[in-house]
Amino acid sequence: MTTAPEIICLTNGMFQENCFIISDPETRDAVLVDPGEEAELFLRRLEHERLTLRAIWLTHAHLDHVAGVKHVIEHTKVPIYLHPADRSLYDNVERQGQWLGVGSEASPPPDHELQHGDQLTVGNCVFAVRHVPGHSPGGVALVAPGIVLSGDALFAGSIGRTDLPGGDTETLLTSIREQLLTLPDETVVYSGHGPEATLWAERRSNPFLTGAYRIV
């Protein structure tokens, strides 16, 4: 029997990135989704909540979502999950930092490759992996009943930028239509930046989805 996960959002760093702690309230097992810059913040919160970290799941490999991986791994030795299409971005995180004008360190190599259709578990909580390229080649969304962690594919009132290496606007819009908007209206979207939303609200008010804002 599956369990509904508990979700803690930790907004952190200069990019105001959302790192998520996903946990099973019964087993107290947890995963970190997209550990950004403030790794100590995440580790302290895990300790405060008395959670046991089991893995790091990455929705994609842009610097603001992976900057804390190295430090977390040094303290926990948990496996890292990443879609292989983002491996080049991941392996070049130091170059990403140079491009953005911030310091960054290389992270340990991923242990597991995420693929569309995979099922991930933390305790008795189950998430399905959906490939949502467009913001980056290997972007994924993580779906559980009533929940989707969309990475930087879909935000409240906006979509992910596509002017970074590997980005493509039409690909992203197709990913959103086929992999996210096919979920139920009541699904809560937890994005990589900004507040949560529902798919009901995004279908009706997000200008990139309603056609109010047309991308040339």
Image (spheres, rainbow, N blue to C red):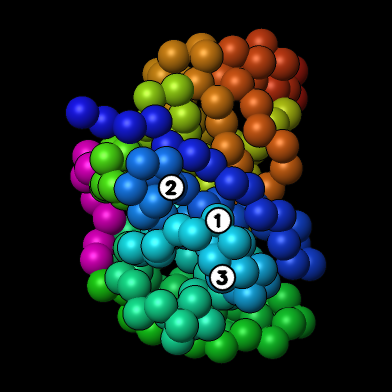
Q: Are marks 2 and 3 in contact (CB under 8 Å)?
A: no
Residue at 23% over, 43% down: 119
- Rendered image quadrant of residue 10: bottom right
Q: Which residue is mark 2?
A: 23
* Mark 2 residue type: Ser
Q: Of marks 2 and 3, which one's residue comes earlier in the chain?
A: 2
Few, some or many residues within 10 Å of mark 3 (<14, 14–19, 20+) = some
Which of the two marks, 1 or 3, is nearer to us in this view? 1
Q: Of marks 1 and 2, which one's residue comes earlier in the chain?
A: 2
Q: Are marks 1 and 2 in contact (CB under 8 Å)?
A: yes
- Which contiguous range is marked in magenta? 112-119
Q: For marks 1 and 2, give the CA distance.
A: 10 Å
Q: Is residue 92 visible?
A: no
Q: Which mark is residue 43?
A: 3
Q: 124 or 197: which is nearer to us?
A: 124
Q: Position of residue 126 (x, y in %)?
A: 29, 38
- Placement of 203 over or under 41, stated as above or below: above
Q: Which residue is mark 1?
A: 49
Is 158 placed left or right of 29 in the picture?
right
Is 16 placed left or right of 20 in the picture?
right
Q: Position of residue 50 (x, y in %)?
A: 49, 59
Q: 88 or 198: which is nearer to us?
A: 198
- Placement of 44 over or under 185, stated as above or below: below
* Mark 3 residue type: Leu
* Mark 1 residue type: Glu
Give the secondary structure at mark 1: loop
Residue at 53% over, 62% down: 46
Q: Position of residue 130 (x, y in %)?
A: 34, 39
Q: Of marks 1 and 3, which one's residue comes earlier in the chain?
A: 3
Residue at 40% over, 18% down: 182
Q: How many marks?
A: 3
